[in-house]
């Protein structure tokens, strides 16, 4: 892979990681200001939908545009998920300190959130990318 190809996958990882962060923070703020429990759930569901769309688009980008192998696709998409989760954990730690509710155990989230989100993301992306690769070969 040449330098431009390397930059394309890295830019995608950074971009999608930021999408996860922005979706998490913005929809959480909207959910916290919701007038009803139903609206709070709706805003949280919207965050999940946006994140799922970003995840699917990232898999498509890796598989179709970059022609990455299923393993590489899974690695890159799970890196974006881990980056987004880490950024959200940092934001949660900053928020906890700002409202004087920070405890040393909050630091665990800096490692736990990326690991607990990236591992299942890797498995799902690997399965989807492998299925897409098989479908491509049978066409």
Image: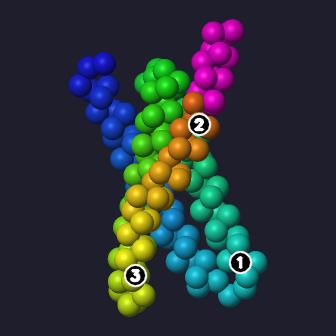
Queried whether the magenta region covers residue 65, the answer comes back as: no
Mark 1 / mark 2, whichever is N-terminal:
1
Element at label 3? loop
Q: From the viewer's perspective, is the residue at label 1 or at label 2 nearer?
A: 2
What's the distance in space between the residues labelled 3 and 2, CA to CA?
32 Å
Pick the front one: 71 or 64: 71
Pick the front one: 127 or 29: 127
What's the distance in space between the residues labelled 3 and 1, CA to CA?
30 Å
Q: Is residue 92 left or right of residue 51?
A: left
Identify the residue under disc 2.
Answer: 123
Mark 3 / mark 2, whichever is N-terminal:
3
Element at label 2? helix
Q: x and y percent of residue 48 in the render?
A: 62, 58
The answer to whether residue 139 is visible is yes
Relative height, residue 137 to residue 35 (above, below):
above
Q: Which mark is residue 126?
A: none
- Give the magenta range: 127-139
Identify the residue under disc 3.
Answer: 103
Q: x and y percent of residue 14 in the render?
A: 36, 47
Q: Rate crowding at label 2 as few (under 14), some (14 to 19) or many (20 or more) other CA atoms within 10 Å.
A: some
In the picture as drawn, the residue positioned furthest to the right comes out as: 38
Q: Is residue 59 left or right of residue 45?
A: left
| Residue positioned 51% across, 65% down in the render | 24
| Residue positioned 35% across, 86% down in the render | 98
Q: Which mark is residue 39?
A: 1
Pick the front one: 125 or 61: 125
The answer to whether residue 85 is visible is no
């Amino acid at each position: 892979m040449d330098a431009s190809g390397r930059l394309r996958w890295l830019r995608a990882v950074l971009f999608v990681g930021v999408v996860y962060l922005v979706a998490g923070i913005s929809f959480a703020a909207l959910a916290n200001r919701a007038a009803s429990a139903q609206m709070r759930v709706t805003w949280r569901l919207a965050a999940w939908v946006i994140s799922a769309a970003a995840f699917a688009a990232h898999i498509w980008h890796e598989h179709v545009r970059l022609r990455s192998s299923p393993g590489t696709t899974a690695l890159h998409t799970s890196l974006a998920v881990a980056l987004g989760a880490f950024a959200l954990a940092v934001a949660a730690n900053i928020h906890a300190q700002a409202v004087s509710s920070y405890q040393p155990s909050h630091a665990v989230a800096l490692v736990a959130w990326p690991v607990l989100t990236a591992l299942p993301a890797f498995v799902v992306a690997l399965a989807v990318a492998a299925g897409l690769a098989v479908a491509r070969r049978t066409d």
